[in-house]
Structures are given as structure tokens and as C-alpha cells.
Amino acid sequence: MNKQSFRNFFPAILVFLVLNSGLLIMMNRLEDWGFDYTVLVFGNLVIFGISFLSYWMAVKGLTTKNNHAFFRWVYGSIMMKLFLLAGAAFIYIVMNKKEVNKPSLFFCMGLYIIYTFIEVSALMKVNKQKTNA
């Protein structure tokens, strides 16, 4: 991934850092509101990590000259993101059967939407800068 592609993903890094520091600051208040702090922090970390990996794979696909490689990288990134995040949610639900913190789980779903929006807008910028088209 080149420097410009990494810069396009910078808003996601910023959201990750601001959100984790905000969660750390508001830890006690979040527990009063019914959120599980560890689920939020771990969920943010997992979603950010998988989004970064997905973005990296999609950028590799966008910068390749081979059409088949493009489809492999882009669809692979989508499928990897889907299965890893669904698997993480499934593992959390199975491990905490009756103690699943639904507000935290729904908050993590919102984080997924935010990171996906940032990832897609960054990929659109990479696509505009592409020189091998």
C-alpha cells in the first residue's frame, strides 16, 4: 500500500483513536447506561483491524492490471470481512449466552457501518487516483 492509499484511510485511524480514548474517559458512565466497556473496546479494535485488512486487500485489487485478480482481491476482502465479523459476533454470543450485552452489540454494528463508510470513501479516492486504467 502506497503512502497516498494510507492517507486515504487516515479518517478511520482517527475515528479509532478518538473513540477508544472517549470510551476510556467515559468508562463508568457507559456502565451506568448499560453498556459493557470491554465489549465496546474489543469490538472497536476487531472491527478496525478487519476494516484495515479489508481496505488493504481492496487497494491491492484496485491497483492490479489483471481483471481476475481485481475480482479475487475485492470479493475476497468483502467475504473476509463478512465471515470474520459474523464469526466474532457468533463467538461472543455463544460464550455469553444469557449475559449478552445487546446495547454494546448494537453499538458495534453501528461502528461497522461507520468504518465501512470510511473504507468505501477511501477506496473511491484510490480509484480516482489510479493510473493503470
Image: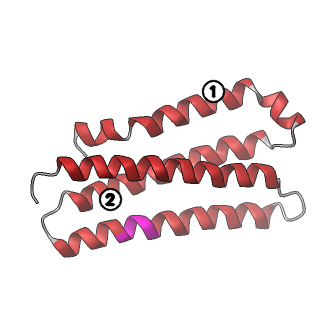
In the displayed structure, 126 sits above or below 25; it is below
Badge 1 crowding class, 10 Å Cα cut-off, few under 14, some 14 to 19, many 20 or more, is few
The residue stretch that appears in magenta: 75-79
- Residue 81 percent across, percent down from the top left: 49, 63
Which of 126 and 105 lies nearest the eye of the viewer? Answer: 126
Neighbours of disc 2 within 10 Å: few (<14), some (14-19), many (20+): many
Q: Earlier in the sequence, mark 1 or mark 2?
A: 1
Residue type at tag 1: Ser
Identify the residue at image location x=79%, y=50%. 103
Q: Which residue is mark 1?
A: 21
- Judged left or right of residue 9, residue 5 is left
Helix, strand or loop status at disc 1: helix
Mark 1 → mark 2, Cα distance in angstroms: 28 Å
Q: Quadrant of residue 54?
A: bottom left
The residue at which mark 2 appears reads as: 58
The amino acid marked with disc number 2 is: Ala
Picture residue at 46% right of the left edge, 40% below the top: 12
Q: Where's the C terminus, which quadrant?
A: bottom left
Residue 77 part of the magenta segment: yes
Q: Residue at x 40, y 53 (%)?
A: 120
